[in-house]
Image (cartoon, grey):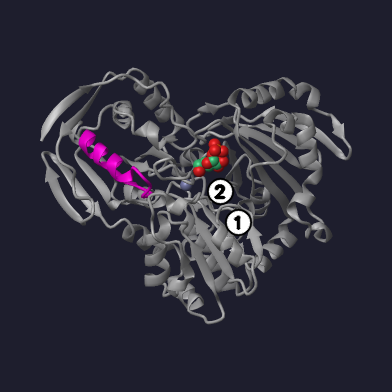
Amino acid sequence: MKNITVATQPFSDQRPGTSGLRKKVSVFQQPHYLENFVQATFDALGGVKGKQLAVGGDGRFYNREALQTIVRLGLGNGLKKLVIGQGGILSTPAASCVIRKYGLDGGFILSASHNPGGPHGDFGIKFNTANGGPAPEKITEAIYQKSLGLDRYLTVESPDIDLDTQNRFMIGEMAIEIIDPVSDYADLMMELFDFPAIAKLLQDQDFAFLFDAMHAVTGPYAEEIFCRRLGAASTSLINCTVKPDFGGGHPDPNLKYAKDLVRIMFGEKAPALGAASDGDGDRNMILGDNFFVTPSDSVAVIAANAHLIKGYRKGLKGVARSMPTSCALDAVAKELNIDCYETPTGWKFFGNLLDAGKLTICGEESFGTSSDHIREKDGLWTVLFWLNLMAIKKISVKEIVAAHWQHFGRNYYSRHDYEEVDNKAANQLVDDLRKRFERLRGTRFGSLEITKADDFSYLDPIDNSLSKQQGIRLIFKDKSRIILRLSGTGTSGATLRLYFEKVEKNPAGMNLETQTALAQLIKLADDLFAIKKITGRSEPTVIT
Ligand code: G1P
Ligand code: ZN
């Protein structure tokens, strides 16, 4: 092994977005691109001499090559230890679990989450800190600043390491541990949920369960947890082989992309519970027999029922949701008499609150739910929560949600995405709207009156950091909301996200189709923002 210092030039586009650095694979394949980002991260941490990190990814194209690069930069920078998931695999929640369990200083997760993979798809890398959570903005910003001034990186000339055998060995001064990527995470799940009760449910002839891994990272986790530890039939799992291009699919668990699952769950004789997870295993979609649970409702149901579940019997310290997520969770918090925090979009904003012991459960409308057991959202945790709840309640998913609405009210909710919109037009739209807040306040549109028009900003109550311009909000007198923001995770053009919410407290009005219930708000947004004109589209790319 020979240590070398490689001269390089900065790339100007390495500012991490909502969730790490995501680019087309071809961008990452440019000479020095990944090396620069990893070195900038090490520099932003003040060097990594003597530090211990984890690394693993979602198995997408370029995962293994990137991992070998990180091993070499670790060696070049004097890292003490690197813990690697066998085969280069670690789901995002499992990486968070491993960092926390082994007291590591942080880790890299190689993933572009739900973005498509393969040679023409996306690749990504995100850094998580010692608490197991995504690096907060002050670290991601420091990484970006370092990347802009980078003129060298430290690496070694050495052969690839064997990623496929569980093993411990030394290369020079650095220890490498290749671990089972699944077992630590599966053990943690057994501490939180009543596995014997779930096993009984899964083995009941009258109960059918279907999980779709979308050819992404949760495949091996689902096989271990659902089949080996809980005795589910292997027919309960579909698309569970990890493929570098996710089988050509778009590994995003929603009604549009989880096609195989949706077809079965909305067909005749559908299973009682259906679920899917995304590329890196942090997202989830929950479906009942011919029934879709919105993620905003899912986190509210979870919070309302947590006291019934083994790991949460002591009750909840508090809950949190991202700003665009529906206010269904707030109603639960009110009844439980606990705080409900409203944070900007992105899991990183929950980290401080979780570390300070202010929160137990949190969630985002974007198919993310989790608790304080780790510092990431957690797809399989959510599926296990619903299985455990069904084992206790012995009623259908639809009945669980309907009972929740009866008690707390129903928050009709939908998100409309316009993908690959011209960047300039999208930014112009947002800038123009900011200038119209004054005029919009107090304006009436039929039965709707705008009481608040602003750009959400968040003062972190723990470290007092201020995050501005986190999404435009129109809030109406009847508590309806229209929110507009630009995505921070896309890799081509701008993605415009529009979020609609309407609160219904009257049981007689709770059975409308969602888009129908929200039609007035959807029409108003189009009139006010001229979405069709600006995007040149007659309808959204994705509706969730
Ligand atoms: C999206 C979601 C956000 C989530 C993030 C990472 O970010 O909206 O809730 O935390 O992906 O999974 P966005 O593209 O909207 O910035
Ligand atoms: Zn993800």
Q: Residue at x 63, y 75 (%)?
A: 269
Residue 147 in the image: above or below residue 211: above
Lower position in the chain sequence, tag 2 or tag 1: 1
Magenta span includes 276: no
Name the kind of residue labelled 2 in the image: Gly
Q: Residue furthest right?
A: 446
Q: Which residue is mark 1?
A: 298
Question: What stretch of residues is rendered in magenta?
Answer: 53-74
Image spot of residue 326 (x, y percent): 66, 46
Ligand 1 within 8 Å of disc 1? The answer is: no
Q: Residue at x 41, y 51 (%)?
A: 93
Image spot of residue 436 (x, y percent): 75, 22
Whether residue 336 is visible here, answered yes or no, is yes
Q: 302 left or right of 53?
A: right
Name the kind of residue labelled 1 in the image: Ser
Q: Are marks 2 and 1 in contact (CB under 8 Å)?
A: yes
Image spot of residue 526 (x, y percent): 76, 35
Magenta span includes 56: yes
- Give the image quarter of residue 307: bottom right
Q: Which residue is mark 2?
A: 363
